[in-house]
Structures are given as C-alpha cells and as structure tokens.
C-alpha cells in the first residue's frame, strides 16, 4: 500500500541518528540523572554481572527459563548522554547456530521484526505531523462516516486510537487460516476458503489494500465506549496509518528500519515458521517494521536527550499516562504500556515509572523500555522462543535500574556540602545539604542567630496544619527539572531549581473505619508554592553549577541573602580539619604478569609479596585466583584471564576479584581495612584518562580507601639510593625517600618497555618513550619458534615462559652467536652445529607427575636418541634450544626481527634524549637504571651500555645498572614514597574526592611527584 512505500522512504533517509518518605514525593527523579555511566564502576559491575549471567545461560550452566537452542537475541542499554547516539553503553548479542539463513555475525545492526514497537514510530510520526489529534477521524477518512457502522467513528479521535481508548477491536480481519483444522477438531462449523475475509489472512490471501482495510473496519463491532477503558487495537493504528499517508514527508534518520519484507542479509531469522518476509500491508503502522538495536538506540537517545525533532514540551506530554490498565501498577499511554514499580531499587525503595512497548509476531518478540527519570532506555529484540523476551526484560530492568539509581545517588554526593554567605557579614547565613537513605535533605539552615529549619517547619505547620495531621522533619529537596543559564563571579553557570518538601502524614487518628487510607493520597504535589514571603516561595531553592558540573553556589530566594558558597570557595575560610592521615599504607605495583604488594606501617616497610595478577583455569577446569596459582600442579594447557592489557587495567571485574582475594576477603592473605589505609598505586606512563578515572572511582567508590595516590610506576624508582645501585663509593649516597636529582628509568616488563627520564622525581613527559616489546611478546615469539621447529607449544605458553626465563640471554655479538649456531647449507653441514658452538642447551619439559617445572641442562645428544627411548631408558621430553636462546631477547634491541615496526631500545633512548635540553644529557646518561623482569636476562645491562655508548657524544659518561632485585625495585620505591614528608599533600583523601570529583583528582595526580 502507499503507506508502506512512503514509510520506506521516510525511514531510510540518512544521517545516522518505597519508603514512606518517597511514596509521595514530587513526581520526577529523586536525584538528578546520572552522567557518564560507562565510567561508573557501579554500572560497570552491574553490566559485568549480567554479562556473566547471560554467558552462563547461553552455555547451559544455569537455567535460562526458555529453550536456548533456537534462540537469538540482542540487548542494549542507552543513556541520555552517550557519546554516539547509535552506540549503546552496554550490549549483548547471541545468535542461534540453528538459524537457516540471514546474518552470521550478529551485532547492533542485525535486523529483527519488532512487532508492535512499530506503534511507537507511528505515534512519533503522528506527533511530528502537526495534525490535530483531537479531531474526529472522519475528518481525515470520510469513508468511516458510514451510517451502517456499529462503531461511531465521528466520536473517535486520533489521540484515542493512539492511546487504545477508541473502543476499537484488536484487528480489522482477525481470522487465522492456520487454525482452520483446529477449529474443526474442536467442533466449530467448517469453513470454506470463500468464507474468510478477502484479504489480510496469512496463508490464504494477500495483505489488504487501503480500500479493503477501510471497508473491513466499518464492519467491526465496538468492544468498549470511546474513552471508557483501554482496549488494545491494531485496527486503530491501521486507521492512523491511512491518515498519515497524506502528510508523511520527513526522514526519521534510521538506517536499518524498514517495513517488512526486507532482504535476508542482515536479518536474524529463526528456524521453523516465522513472520520474516511477510508483507504486513496496512498493518505496518501497527506491527510491521523491521529494525535493529542501533536504530532503536538512536531514537531512544534522541528522546532521552530531548534532541528528537519534537519540542521538549511535546516529548514531556508524550511520556504521560492516558488511562489505567486494570492493575495497581499498570497504565497505558500513546501507545505506552506503563509500569510504576517500587521494587526496581531495593536498596532505596521508591516508585519508578517504566514507559515500555512490547512487540510480538510469529517467532519474534521485543520490548522497548524508557526510564526517563534516570535517563536510560533498554531494548530487547529476540527471535525464536517467545518466552525469552519477558525473562530478558525482567533481568535488564532489575539489573540496570538499580545500578543507575545507585550511580545517581553517588553522583549526588557532590551536593552534600556546607555553604555560607558569599558576602562578609556579621550574621552570615549557613546551610548544610546531606543525603539520607531516601533523598537529599536540608540538614541545617541558620541565619540571624536562628534555626531557620525549625522556623520553616513552624510556618508550614501554622499554615497547613489544619489540613495535615503531621508535618515532619526532615526537609527533603527534589530537583524540579528547571534550569537557566546565568553568571556568577563573571563565569557562566547553570542555575538549577529545587523543591523543599517536609514529610507529610495524611491520616488523622480515629476509631472510625478506613483509618489511614488517606496516607495513600499523595498530598505532596498539591502543596508546592503555597507559602510566600516577600514575593518568593518558601519551598524554592537554587543550586549554581559551573561548566564542569561543580557546585559553586546555593540560594534561598525567600531569605534574600545572595548566593551562599561552598565553605572552601575562593579560599575565604580555612579548610576544616580533615580525617587523620592513615598510619598504614598499602603499596601496589600492579603489573600485567604479577602485582607486587605490601604494607608500610608506621614508617616500617614490610616485605612485599609477588602475586600472579590473573585468574587461571587448568585443563581439569579448576580455577585459581591470584596466589592460589601456587597450588596448581599441572600447568599444561592452562588458560589465563588477565585484568591488565598493554600495561593498563582494562578488566576491573577480574582485577577486583584478584584484589578481593588478596586484600579484602575474610581469608585474604594480606587483610586490609580500606577505611583506615592509604593506597599507593603504580601505573604505566601516558595512561588513558578514561581508564585512570575508572581506577580512581573504583578505589574510592568500590573500596572506600581513606587516602590514595596514583603515580607513574617508573617514577617510584627515583625514591632510592641511586648511587648505591651503581656501587660507586666516590659518589655520596642519596636519601632513599628523597627523589634523585636526575635518573633515566628503563622499565622492561611483561607488557612493554618504557623509557622515563625523571628530574627530581617528576617525569619529563615529552621525553617518555614506549616500546611495545615485553615479556609477553618474547614468550609468544619463542612459542612460535619452538612450535615450528620442535613441539606444538601454542597452548602451553606458561611452560614456554618458564623456559624463556631459564634459558634466554642477551648476546653481545648477535652475528657471531648466529654464526656459531648456523647449520650450514644442505650439502655442507657444519660439524659444530650440533652443540651450537657451546650455545646449545637442553630443556627437559615438566611431565606434571614427577616434576612440575622444567629443567635446563647442558646439551646431551644421547638424551635425544630414539633407540634409547625405544629401550625405555628415557621418559623425558627434551627440547634443544640453540639460536632461540638469544634470538628471542634480541627483539628488545631489534624489534624488526619479529616484524615490529619500532626502533630498538637504544635508539629510543637516543630519541628520548633528543627531547631533553643538552644540559641534562650527562646526568641522565650517568644514571640509567633498568628494572622489570627482562632486566634479569644475562647480558642485558652490558649490551644496553654498549649500544648507548655508540649513540651518544664521546664526552658523556654512560652508566647502566640494575638494582639487586629489578622485580621489586619499583615497589620499594613506592614504599619509600609512602614515608616521604610530603605524601599527605600528594595523596587525595576520600573526602576531597567526594568534594571535588574525579576530574579534580585526575588534574592533581597529573602534576607529578614533584608537585
């Protein structure tokens, strides 16, 4: 029909687009919408837990609630401030392997039939059209003005139809040809094909034309009087679609949303009978669209952020109920199915409105849900078993609404401040905002020597006391949703409006029946703006926010004190004494392979522990977390899940599991009380700001450390007796907890190798260099060489890593050693090749029965004799290592040997020096300290010194040294820093974090150790 073809054009045009306190709160959010949800550890933890549960359901390790075999689904969460409208903040996709055709790699652009979610699109177009929704439908479709019709169409409007309040039956032609034999079997009279309607009967005839659809609806019987009660109606949306044909013109900016049928390329098509490919015809506006979660994300984001091409007022009006739906928590809208639920936030119970729309057609079921108060939406699209969608919807709502609300409350901590008059006065106004278990509250308000909170309560009681039995403390504050742009101290601000509300009781004590029924009658919405003083309402409060979202002012217009400022604003008042500095510091050098951790207690440094930073699973599927790995006796084919990749913590779910196991669980080996402990945490140079912010949030929000310093790990090495490392008696030793004047730290660890020049403990950022070669790359390279020449060791990287550490060395003359180990040509074998000129070594592989570790031995040809093995004289599996021993570490000095397009280590040192003033070269070159596991390779220091000397001026003295233990040297530097006299100024307290926020913390840490 015409509507379908026009809708295709319309859609396809680019661009991409309860506690008693809260039972009767003012309508709207309890605290402001959260921002930057992907950066919130609370949201991240909830998302990770649901992902893990879904993985378990898909694998069959937990009960899903429906048959998983034929099931496909796509799930997303959308936020009002996500960076890209079409990229959700969380998504999960599963494709059934049984699908006969369609997409083979489901993603956010995979297409599903969305059924009656199509009605949301239809209503959006209706609102966008500007048509009069309250005019009778007969004005637009005169054919309906039929005196023989039993439905009085002249009394029905488009708004009624969009809200299911027209009293119109569910379908125009509600016949099911597939049930023909079922009806007959149950005793109903037989039907000929000619007895069915002439169109719209699936399996028998084509979709209805416009004229046939109109003729069909005029023969329908009403199911309720108009506006009497909601009755779900697809036929009503057919009428809306026919009306919209006349005014449809503008694009929706959606790429994957079309009327059915569409091609199979992107389709998620379940096995068996389904509605895929069915032409919905006139039923398209009611339930005939195909869409993707990417397109639905764009639409949901536009609605949440009020960037949809409707006015904010039109969107607010759209998100309102039109009728009750038969249950205490259910209502209907245009075309919403609204739930008002109190159990979505179990820790802080209050009613939360979910504006949803369900959709279903054969083998497809879907749900779109908006929680507009807190700025999120969720989409569930399924193909296959129809039972999947409601289970998934419940799982997402229960997971994410609670997490988002917790995130909102945490972000609302920034309002918890003391405020005082901006202008100096003998009688300043002072106020305190805090947050209890229910909401933000006005804890105190003092001025002119009086308790203004008590005064406000007395005023309300004297004016409203005759209406309410009790008016109670506390005075709660709720956002109004109103804001204006203004200026304060010459800087732009946003001025938010807030309500002040006391707790109210509505029922009087009586012995008559019905006592306390009125408690369910929420009077709170009626009392706003009741009482004024000097033209200003007593219940109005203003909060001023700067461009970064920080609070710079508080106002009570009825007091006319001007703006109250946070007590620390402008340095006008001395900072109140904070909590006492902790005497215990936990120092963590959080490496990718191992983390080094230990305490500094009262100035005394404990011995650090070296802990595997991983979660491992052996071939018997036993799991080992962190130090539990020491209990493993079979490392064959062991698999690792590491929280650190490329040096950065990218998997906080795994990292928290490791930290919890080692520091915070009841049986943790290093039991720690975060509330009484400072954390010093090392990180690699040039960290990504988002990852750093995530880290700061976890430290304070998840663990609640009393104090915290996050520093660049290599800089900790400056807090040593550097001259003691070089063992030069003529140089005076340095104090270990005072940063050395100048030092260049080479940190060659598991993930990478970094060059960090330090001046008085501060990194010279422009000269920091990174080589993407570390222990992991070397192990993988050795694995590849061994798998090509000997055994396939690709699943035994743990064994290969041990082999590398025992057998490899850095050659001082690569060409000479390669010559010694060269076989020669095919026709001229070199006799000394077998022993490799003394370089060859045998590595006896562990069998995990008699020995769990490998053994490095001198080369023994008899060990490899087939006759000896055949005679049962040897059960050992031995590898002979020749040029692999030095070719693997050579990648650090010549990465191109392994196909890595980066300069070698010595060249990078020269490149780093070129970024520094020439006057710093001598002191840097005379103090090169090498730390990290790769520094333990024999010959590493000598080779590096040799190559650096070749690249620098002759008058420069080059000294390269490694400390006694290059593995823990960085940790000991951090421990020395913990005893530094300025550590309290360097670290951030939890109170400062909550007061200033994550951005301020990041800026403070970025100033470096010498700040």
Image (tube, helix red, strand yellow):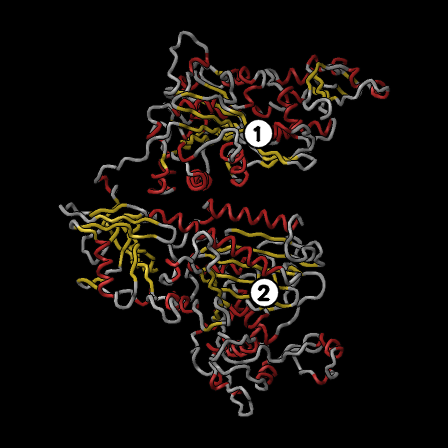
For the question of whether residue 447 can be seen, the reply is yes
Sort mark 1 into few (<14), some (14-19) or many (20+) by Cα contacts within 10 Å: many
Residue at image location 26% in from the left, 55% down from the top: 486
Asked if 669 appears above or below 727 in the picture, the reply is below
Relative side of 464 to 167, left or right? left
What is the quadrant of residue 894 in the picture? Answer: top right
Quadrant of image for the N terminus: bottom right
Q: Residue furthest front?
A: 511
What is the quadrant of residue 118 in the picture? Answer: bottom right
Which mark is first along the chain, 1 or 2? 2
Which residue was labeled with disc 2? 114
Q: Residue furthest left?
A: 426
Residue 356: image x %, image y %?
51, 64
For the question of whether residue 497 can be seen, the reply is no
Which numbered dot is residue 627?
Answer: 1
Q: Which of 566/928 is in front? A: 566
Residue 119: image x %, image y %?
53, 70
């Amino acid at each position: 029909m015409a509507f379908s073809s026009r809708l295709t054009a319309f859609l396809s045009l680019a661009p991409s687009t309860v506690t008693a306190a809260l039972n009767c709160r003012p309508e709207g959010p309890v605290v402001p919408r959260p921002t930057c949800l992907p950066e919130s550890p609370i949201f991240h933890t909830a998302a990770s837990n649901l992902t893990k549960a879904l993985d378990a359901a898909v694998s069959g390790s937990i009960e899903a609630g429906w048959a998983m075999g034929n099931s496909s689904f796509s799930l997303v969460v959308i936020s009002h401030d996500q960076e890209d409208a079409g990229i959700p903040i969380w998504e999960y996709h599963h494709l059934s392997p049984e699908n006969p055709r369609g997409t083979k790699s489901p993603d956010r652009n995979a297409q599903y039939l969305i059924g009656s979610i199509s009605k949301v699109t239809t209503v959006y177009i209706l609102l966008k059209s500007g048509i009069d929704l309250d005019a009778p439908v007969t004005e637009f479709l005169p054919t309906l003005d039929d005196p023989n019709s039993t439905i009085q169409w002249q009394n029905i409007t488009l708004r009624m139809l969009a809200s299911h309040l027209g009293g119109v039956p569910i379908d125009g032609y509600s016949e099911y040809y597939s049930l023909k034999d079922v009806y007959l079997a149950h005793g109903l009279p037989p039907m000929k094909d000619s007895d069915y309607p002439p169109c719209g009967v699936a399996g028998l005839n084509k979709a209805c034309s416009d004229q046939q659809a109109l003729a069909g609806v005029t023969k329908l019987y009403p199911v309720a009087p108009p506006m009497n009660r909601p009755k779900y109606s697809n036929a009503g949306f057919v009428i809306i679609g026919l009306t919209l044909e006349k005014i449809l013109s503008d694009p929706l900016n959606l790429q994957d949303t079309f009327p059915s049928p569409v091609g199979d390329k992107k389709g998620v098509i379940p096995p068996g009978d389904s509605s895929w490919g069915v032409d919905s015809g006139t039923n398209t506006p009611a339930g005939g669209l195909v869409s993707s979660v990417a397109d639905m994300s764009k639409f949901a984001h536009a609605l949440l952020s009020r960037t949809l091409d409707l006015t904010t007022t039109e969107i607010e009006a759209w998100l309102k109920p039109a009728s009750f739906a038969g249950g205490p928590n259910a209502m209907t809208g245009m075309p919403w199915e609204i739930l008002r639920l109190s159990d979505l936030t179990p820790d802080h119970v209050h009613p939360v409105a979910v504006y949803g729309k369900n959709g279903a057609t054969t083998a497809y079921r879907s749900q779109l849900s908006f929680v507009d108060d807190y700025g999120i939406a969720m989409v569930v699209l399924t193909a296959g078993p129809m039972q999947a969608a409601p289970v998934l919807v419940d799982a997402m709502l229960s997971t994410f609404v609670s997490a988002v609300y917790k995130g909102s409350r945490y972000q609302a901590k920034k309002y918890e401040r003391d405020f005082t008059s901006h202008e100096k006065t003998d009688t300043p106004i002072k106020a305190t905002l805090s947050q209890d278990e229910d909401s933000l509250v006005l804890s105190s308000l003092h001025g002119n020597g009086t308790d203004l909170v008590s005064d406000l309560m007395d005023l309300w009681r004297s004016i409203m006391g005759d209406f309410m039995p009790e008016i109670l403390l506390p005075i709660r504050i709720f956002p109004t949703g109103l804001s204006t742009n203004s200026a304060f101290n010459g800087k732009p601000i946003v001025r938010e409006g807030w309500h002040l509300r006391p707790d109210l009781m509505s029922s009087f004590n009586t012995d008559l029946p019905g006592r306390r029924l009125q408690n369910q009658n929420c009077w709170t919405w009626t009392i706003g703006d009741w009482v004024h003083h000097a033209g200003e309402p007593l219940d109005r409060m203003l909060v001023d926010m700067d461009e970064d979202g920080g609070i710079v002012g508080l106002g009570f217009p009825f007091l006319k004190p001007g703006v109250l400022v946070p007590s620390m604003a402008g340095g006008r008042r001395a900072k109140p004494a904070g909590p006492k500095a902790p005497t215990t510091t936990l120092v963590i050098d959080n490496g990718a392979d191992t983390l080094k951790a230990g305490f500094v207690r009262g100035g005394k440094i404990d011995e650090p522990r070296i802990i595997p930073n991983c979660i491992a699973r052996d071939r018997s599927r036993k799991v080992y977390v962190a130090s539990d790995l020491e209990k493993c006796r079979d490392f064959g084919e062991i698999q690792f899940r590491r929280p650190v990749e490329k040096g950065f913590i990218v998997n906080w779910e795994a990292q928290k599991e490791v930290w919890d196991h080692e520091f915070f669980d009841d049986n943790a080996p290093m039991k720690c009380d975060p509330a009484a402990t400072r954390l010093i945490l090392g990180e690699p140079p040039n960290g990504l700001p988002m990852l750093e912010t995530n880290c700061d949030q976890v430290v304070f929000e998840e663990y609640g450390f009393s104090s915290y310093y996050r520093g660049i790990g290599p800089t900790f090495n400056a807090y040593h007796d550097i001259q003691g490392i070089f063992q030069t008696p003529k140089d005076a030793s340095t104090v270990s907890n005072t940063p050395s004047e100048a030092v260049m730290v080479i940190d060659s660890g598991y993930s990478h190798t970094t060059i960090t020049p330090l001046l008085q403990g501060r990194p010279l950022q422009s000269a920091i260099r990174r080589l993407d070669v570390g222990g992991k790359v070397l192990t993988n390279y050795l694995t590849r060489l061994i798998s090509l020449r000997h055994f396939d060791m690709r699943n035994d990287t743990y064994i290969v890593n041990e082999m590398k550490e025992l057998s490899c060395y850095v050659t001082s003359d690569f060409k000479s050693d390669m010559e010694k180990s060269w076989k020669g040509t095919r026709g001229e074998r070199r006799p000394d090749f077998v022993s490799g000129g003394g370089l060859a070594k045998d590595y006896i592989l562990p069998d995990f029965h008699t020995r769990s570790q490998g053994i490095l031995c001198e080369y023994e040809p008899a060990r490899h004799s087939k006759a000896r093995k055949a005679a049962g004289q040897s059960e050992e599996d031995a590898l002979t290592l020749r040029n692999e021993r030095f070719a693997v570490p050579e990648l650090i000095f010549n990465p191109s040997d392994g196909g890595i397009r980066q300069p070698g280590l010595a060249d990078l040192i020269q490149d780093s020096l070129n970024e520094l003033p020439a006057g710093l070269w001598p002191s840097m070159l005379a103090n090169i300290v090498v730390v990290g596991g790769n520094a333990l390779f024999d010959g590493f220091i000598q080779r590096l010194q040799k190559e650096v000397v070749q690249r620098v001026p002759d008058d420069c003295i080059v000294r390269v040294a490694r400390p006694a233990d290059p593995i823990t040297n960085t940790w000991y530097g951090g421990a020395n820093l913990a005893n530094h006299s300025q550590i309290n100024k360097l670290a951030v307290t939890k109170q400062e974090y909550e007061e200033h926020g994550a951005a301020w913390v990041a800026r403070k840490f970025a100033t470096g150790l010498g700040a």
